Amino acid sequence: MTMLPLLPHLHPDGRWRWVATGAAGGLGLALAQAPVAWWPAAPLGLAVLAGIVLRAPGRSQALAGGIAFGVGAWLPVLGWLYSGIEPDHAAWFAYGAPTLVIAAFAAGPAACSLVAHTLHARPALTACLLLPALWAGTEWLRQLGSFRFPWAPLGHTQVEAPLAGLAPLIGGLGVGLLTVALGGAIALICLGGCRTRKAAALSLLAILAAAELAARIEWTRPAGAPLRAALMQGGYAGSEKFDSDGVVSALQRYAEFTLHSRARVAILPETALPLLEHELPPGYLDVVERRAREQNRDVLLGLFRRTEDDPRRHHNSARIVGASGAQTYDKTILLPFGETIPAAAILRPLFERIARVPMLDAVPGSRLQPAPVLGGIRIGLRLCFEDLFGDAAREASAAAGYLVVLSNDSWDGSDLPMHQHLPAAQMRALEAAKPLLRVANTGWTASIRADGRIDAVVPPHQPAVLETTLQPRIGITPYVRHGDAIPLGLAALAFSASLSALPGARHGRARDARSAA
């Protein structure tokens, strides 16, 4: 925000000043991401990007400012990618691969800045329609392809902000779009003329008022009796989870928890049992299942299981045993370079020289798996990386009484992934307007209300049990019904409206009118 008044005074040839301004705005945006999670920093940082688009004298300055903004925004957020690698072999790849990921993320703001500046016709349309539409498009593209990695999207910074009230309508992608629009309005208030400032202020207030009204709508309603659940955080770091001592300790700790819990539902993290199912001690699951059935309880746990057609490959799975019957869910969206390697023929030999990641030969499960039943209630179940894709499991969320996320956010050398991943679960709860239970290996394990607020958490990095009670809900929000078609449609309308103000578009309409006459 403090950088905006400087924009009019930047010398046209002083490209480095535009770089400095962009970097400052990007760093401001990074403050909105966890663990700082100061949500006003997102629209304020984006106001700087909008100011660059509006005031840069040329494309090169707009591009330079956009690149600096992207690096400033994403280097602090994704810097954890440099930890946990072994650079002794192929150091160029060890440091080059994370750098390439950060560069790919930074290319989004850079492209938005360049394209918005090139198509700039009217300040209000550019800042509040064109730039938000472009930003939403770049975020959506990160969900596609075999290298997809939609980490820390903009909308997740607003899970406890006023705009969160609109998540059941437009989802996390739409909330991110409106966050950019707020930034554009702030830029216009700081840089525009009197009439422009008034219009921008009214637009800002209108967006916030719409969010407030939407937050008062009860999109879903309570159904049935409250459910008592116990969530077990094992506390095993990634470096110890798969060694022999860690495996034995995990089997003992989780068995004791499942056998002695009295909650209707007991839930363990993703891959809580760090073995293939056939490698478990004989009778291990049978004892857990028998005890749960006798006490009319259910246990949900994570494990690996061999695929049916290739014993060398495996699924990352969740297993339910107990009163609701034996059920298995196989993870459908796998983490690149954590569970599978894209372009494996080329990249796997290089990757194995710089990192030691166990269980890399995972196979995605079928998209047609039935929604599991846990505690006698149908649930929407996601395993870790899957909860970054709001549009992917809408059918399960529609039929669910509550949502469950099993996660394993232990990353050697950094806690940032743990903090940055929690808002994804909050956004999924907001989008569906249903409570969510999140169980993680090292944290954060939390109970989240239907409004996205955290009801209870346990401290990270230690074994702990969180006992909580939730109220199942039924109903379907507009976002669950239509998914990303809503925010993408809004982005398309905003893009079209902004293009309509271009000189060529106006001249074309005038020619058409004369021809019709």
Image: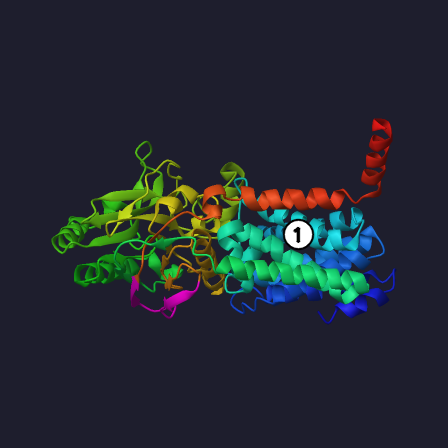
Give percent across and percent down for residue 168.
48, 52
Q: Is residue 341 visible?
A: no
Q: Is residue 309 visible?
A: yes
Quarter of the figure with residue 78: bottom right
Give percent across and percent down for residue 116.
75, 49
265 falls in the magenta region: no
Asked which secondary structure carries label 1, the reply is: helix
Residue found farthest to the front: 517
Tell me which residue sits at (58%, 57%) in the image.
Answer: 154
Q: Which stretch is magenta? A: 453-469
In the figure, 380 relative to 425: above or below?
above
Q: Quadrant of the C terminus?
A: top right
Q: Residues within 10 Å of mark 1 (few under 14, many from 20)?
A: many
Q: Quadrant of the N terminus?
A: bottom right
Tell me which residue sits at (80%, 69%) in the image.
Answer: 6
Residue that mark 1 sits on: 132
Give percent across and percent down for residue 187.
73, 63
Tell me which residue sits at (30%, 60%) in the image.
Answer: 246
What amino acid is found at the position of numbered circle 1 in the picture? Answer: Pro
Name the residue nearer the viewer: 290 or 156: 156
Q: How is the image coloured?
A: rainbow
Name the residue nearer the viewer: 118 or 305: 118
Quarter of the figure with residue 152: bottom right
